[in-house]
Amino acid sequence: MLKINNIHAHIDEKSILKGINLDIKPGEVHAIMGPNGSGKSTLASVIAGKEDYEIDKGSILFEGEDISELSVEERAHKGVFLSFQYPVEIPGVTVTNFIKTALNETRKAKGLDDMPASEMLKAIREKSELLEIDRKFLSRSLNEGFSGGEKKRNEIFQMAMLEPKLAILDETDSGLDIDALRIVANGVNKLKTKDNATLVITHYQRLLDYIVPDYVHVLYDGKIVKSGGKELAFELEEKGYDWIKQEANQNA
């Protein structure tokens, strides 16, 4: 589904990604871990197409198509979803209206008509129940006055409604207490199918107690320096990242 080949990327003349290779197949959950400043969020932004970053070389193939030159919107319409570490507030635009617009824009890009209102309401009701979201929440302005947990839950609600093929969760656990973390993770798990894939980017192992990855990759200094199963996350929690840095520096 997603195949990243030797991606190098920079921002403001600072090289951040230095040769990333990653292969994610449908039905898989991959986790990217690593110390602060290793390039985790940059990788998420580069896959999603944020314009602040320039790709120097390499390719990003999504379902066999090179999407390196596509805009954020075009990638989203093809089924790439990025949840943000710090979601923005949009006063005056309700959660429901935002979802309706996003969903219908995606349908339009696929040559489909707008979703009928009755179908839309049914989907909103089903997905909000799935994620334990109060109906009153849906009529509030997007992220305005939301707690950290509400912002993250709202993003997972957007993901539930848009049904992307690839969901990238960038530090979804930052600022969440354990109850909010559990609800968000449950939502992600309920949305998992054999046809979609998830890339979880996190600094801490605790999120991976709830969203269990098939593969864990450690990013350090812009490169994936170690990959393994979910056990690798426990090892990192126990030992920290220093041993990874030492190994990487010895092999450099």
Image (cartoon, rainbow, N blue to C red):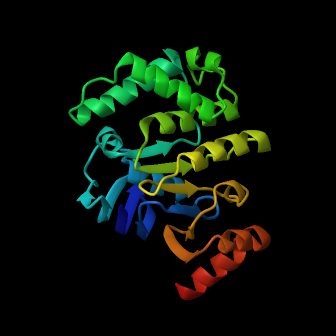
Q: Nearer the viewer, residue 53 or 100?
A: 100
Q: Is residue 31 above or below residue 157?
A: below
Q: Nearer the viewer, residue 98 or 127?
A: 127
Image label count: 0
* Residue sitting at x 64%, y 76%: 245
Q: Residue furthest bottom?
A: 250
Q: Residue furthest left?
A: 111
* Residue sitting at x 44%, y 64%: 17
Q: Position of residue 77 (x, y in %)?
A: 31, 40
Quarter occupied by residue 54: bottom left
Would residue 221 appear left or right of 153 to someone viewing this image?
Answer: left
Q: Is residue 90 above or below residue 154?
A: above
On the question of residue 88 being in view, the answer is no
Would residue 73 appear left or right of 111 to someone viewing this image?
Answer: right
Q: Quadrant of the N terminus?
A: bottom left
Q: Nearer the viewer, residue 9 or 77?
A: 77
On the question of residue 238 being in view, the answer is yes
Q: Nearer the viewer, residue 110 or 250?
A: 110
Q: Residue furthest top?
A: 92
Quarter occupied by residue 97: top left
Q: Position of residue 109 (x, y in %)?
A: 24, 34
* Residue sitting at x 66%, y 58%: 203
Q: Position of residue 157 (x, y in %)?
A: 54, 34
* Residue sitting at x 77%, y 40%: 179
